[in-house]
Image (cartoon, rainbow, N blue to C red):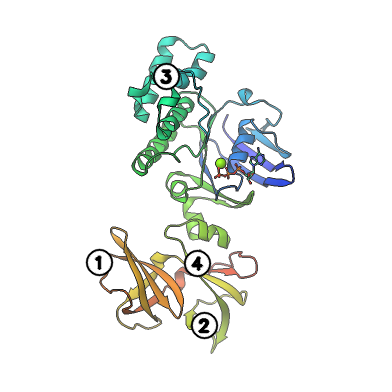
Amino acid sequence: MAEVRVEGLRKEFGKATAVDGLSLTVRDREFLTLVGPSGCGKSTTLRMVCGLERATAGQIYFDDHAVGHLPANKRDVAMVFQSYALYPHRTVAQNIGFALKMMRQPRRTIEEKVGRAARALGIEDLLDRKPRELSGGQRQRVALGRAIVRDAGAYLLDEPLSNLDAQLRVHMRAEIKRLHAEVARTFIYVTHDQVEAMTMSDRIAVLSDGRLQQCGTPEEIYERPSNRFVASFMGSPPMNFLTGSIVDEDGVRRFRTRGIAVDLPAAGGESEVELGVRPEHVLVSPRPEPGFLPGRVFVAELLGADVLVTVDVAGELIKARVPAPFHAGVDSAVHVGIDPAKVHLFAAADGRALTSTRGA
Ligand SMILES: Nc1ncnc2c1ncn2[C@@H]1O[C@H](COP(=O)(O)OP(=O)(O)OP(=O)(O)O)[C@@H](O)[C@H]1O
Ligand SMILES: [Mg+2]
């Protein structure tokens, strides 16, 4: 199997719609991430692809073959469940090797594959334990091991890192990426963590309320979000938003809100907008500069190499990410520059991105 395609996929639970007309193609050997807030329909989508949940409407294709009617064990997919779903009475080794045993692979082969997976996951010492003797993070790694020993056409992973501590998560992020390169198969990865989505994926599909908001490479999603939701969900620290109007003043197109004005490059568009700008595109200067806005430091937080400076500009709190060190203390006067070339504009009415002004 290579390509996974869903068309008009829909799932209703009683009156509630969990997935609402999702169409998406996951290319052969691609690493595609479904990302979105809790309850947006990620697990439900994955369970329909896997065959554990029947779609209310729509179709699923594996390489142009409709598979909507096939049970999970006929679909050539390996899935890691958000809830682990380990066999409680079997040891870690038996859990990881279970599918291989069902396929009647030789014992030596099973031992070898289980051993290799356990080493990659750092759980070699736990092979004889039962799931109840493991921590949440260890159980999660067993669930991951159970999927990676299998030779499947597509790997479906539902939040496989959510219960790991921060350090292990960063480590496993890289391990899964390497695993993907090694096995060269289609991966569909689910997470609510936009950092995981950004760092691991070939492409990202952003979901909200069961609907696809945008699908594209991490760069496309980050640099050209198609609506306000995508812009606000992707990026950490998040984008700044200011609600205001676009006015034409002496031939200059300008964004205005209370005490703030930002000159914009030419281009038509809506008058009631939200202006979005990422913290790394906001400059902070101790001195007045042309086009900068006067403000006061609200708080400064050290991130490591950078400092996240929140500045009160005419009552709006604007966050800037500037290189460390940053010396101005709380309440000191500073000047904030918003790079007009990096500004995003969204229609106030429905949040859709207005034709990019940024030469995208
Ligand atoms: N078996 C079910 N019966 C009724 N409602 C369900 C069922 N499974 C999911 N839902 C509902 O469908 C919606 C989508 O759920 P889903 O589990 O797909 O979300 P999710 O994006 O995976 O969220 P999370 O990040 O919290 O895991 C939610 O509103 C959820 O309450
Ligand atoms: Mg889920």
Using the image, tell me which numbered label, if any, was put on residue 93.
3
Give the residue pinned by disc 2. Answer: 258
Give the residue pinned by disc 1. Answer: 325
- For the residues labelled 2 and 1, the Cα–Cα distance comes to 31 Å
Does mark 2's beta carbon lie closer than 8 Å to ligand 1? no
Q: Amino acid at mark 3?
A: Ala
Residue under the image location 46 percent in, 32 percent down: 184
Does label 4 or label 1 sit earlier along the sequence?
A: 1
Q: Amino acid at mark 4?
A: Gly
Q: Are marks 1 and 3 in contact (CB under 8 Å)?
A: no
Give the image location of residue 139, x and y in percent: 44, 30
Location of residue 325 by image quarter = bottom left
Q: Secondary structure at mark 2?
A: loop
- For the residues labelled 3 and 4, the Cα–Cα distance comes to 54 Å
Q: Amino acid at mark 1?
A: Pro
Q: Are marks 2 and 3 in contact (CB under 8 Å)?
A: no
- For the residues labelled 1 and 3, the Cα–Cα distance comes to 50 Å
Of the four image quadrants, the one with ligand 1 is: top right
Whether residue 252 sits left or right of residue 130 in the image: it is: right
Does label 2 or label 1 sit earlier along the sequence?
A: 2
Using the image, tell me which numbered label, if any, was put on residue 359.
4
Q: Are marks 3 and 4 in contact (CB under 8 Å)?
A: no
**Dot 1: within a 10 Å radius of its alpha carbon, few (fewer than 14), some, or many (20 or more) residues?**
few
- For the residues labelled 4 and 1, the Cα–Cα distance comes to 32 Å
Whether residue 168 sits left or right of residue 341 in the image: it is: left
Closer to the eye: label 1 or 3: 3
Residue under the image location 52 percent in, 11 percent down: 104
Q: Secondary structure at mark 1?
A: loop
Closer to the eye: label 4 or 1: 1
Residue under the image location 64 percent in, 30 percent down: 51
**Dot 2: within a 10 Å radius of its alpha carbon, few (fewer than 14), some, or many (20 or more) residues?**
few
- For the residues labelled 2 and 3, the Cα–Cα distance comes to 64 Å
